[in-house]
Image (cartoon, rainbow, N blue to C red):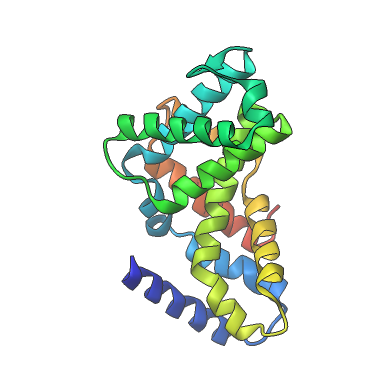
Amino acid sequence: MGTSKKNTNKEVKKLLQQLGKQDIKKSIPQATSLVLDEQRITREISKDSFRIMLQQGINGLNGMFSGGQFGGITYEEIKTDESTFNEFLEKLIELAENDFGDDFSDLLLQAFRLAISVIIKENKSIDEFIAEFTYYLIYLIVQNEIIEVFSDVYLEFSHDDINSLIKLQARKIVTSELTTVIKSYLNARITLKDLVLAIVKRAEAIELGEF
């Protein structure tokens, strides 16, 4: 992982050198497209880990939204009590780990926790969970790879400023069309490779201004 990150950092540095000190709002989309290649995305969601976490999240949320319980925990309890919410969240992850039989990537787990938290606290739908999970995963991948390089080059921008621009870029990538593609993957109508390529193409389209 360390070597891959160093290689990506070098590629991002090289890109910024080629671009010169242009507007950061133009550099972020180009760096995002560079980082979100097939290999980098697959590293986080290989061996069906993304599908399993998505499905476990959907199952848990559906149970809550239908007025039921999850392991004896009610929807109102997880909305109003932080420790109960964390218990619910970790139970979902435990069930997913039992299904997967291997370790999930740290970024995938982080994205899952953030997405579940948003959905519960803001009363969002299952489709919005799929979109939020994907959004946070894309944001974290890109942030993890480019934040240090951009901070070194764009000294006038704080980490928070750069993170905000990365988040905006990730939001543009995750559309309702991409959510439909992810649902096709969940239902085994397309392969993981098809899904990854759809994300790559979406990042490239945003870079070129094809909104």
Up-down: is 165 above or below 199?
Answer: below
Residue 57 visible within the image: yes
Q: Is residue 166 left or right of residue 13?
A: right
- Residue 171 appears at what percent x and percent y? 67, 51
- The residue under the point 65% across, 42% down is 175
**Viewer-proximal residue among 18 and 75:** 75
- Residue 7 appears at what percent x and percent y? 38, 75
Q: Residue 96 lies in what quarter of the image?
A: top left
Quarter of the image containing the N terminus?
bottom left
Residue 131 visible within the image: no
- The residue under the point 61% across, 79% down is 151
Q: Residue 118 lies in what quarter of the image?
A: top right
- The residue under the point 32% across, 72% down is 3
Numbered label tally: 0
- The residue under the point 44% across, 25% down is 187
Up-down: is 21 above or below 109?
Answer: below
Considering every residue shown, the one lying at the far left of the view is 101
**Viewer-proximal residue among 80 and 143:** 80
Q: Residue 63 lies in what quarter of the image?
A: top right
Q: Is residue 39 left or right of residue 125?
A: left
Up-down: is 58 above or below 194?
Answer: above
- Residue 161 appears at what percent x and percent y? 71, 70
- Residue 111 appears at what percent x and percent y? 53, 47
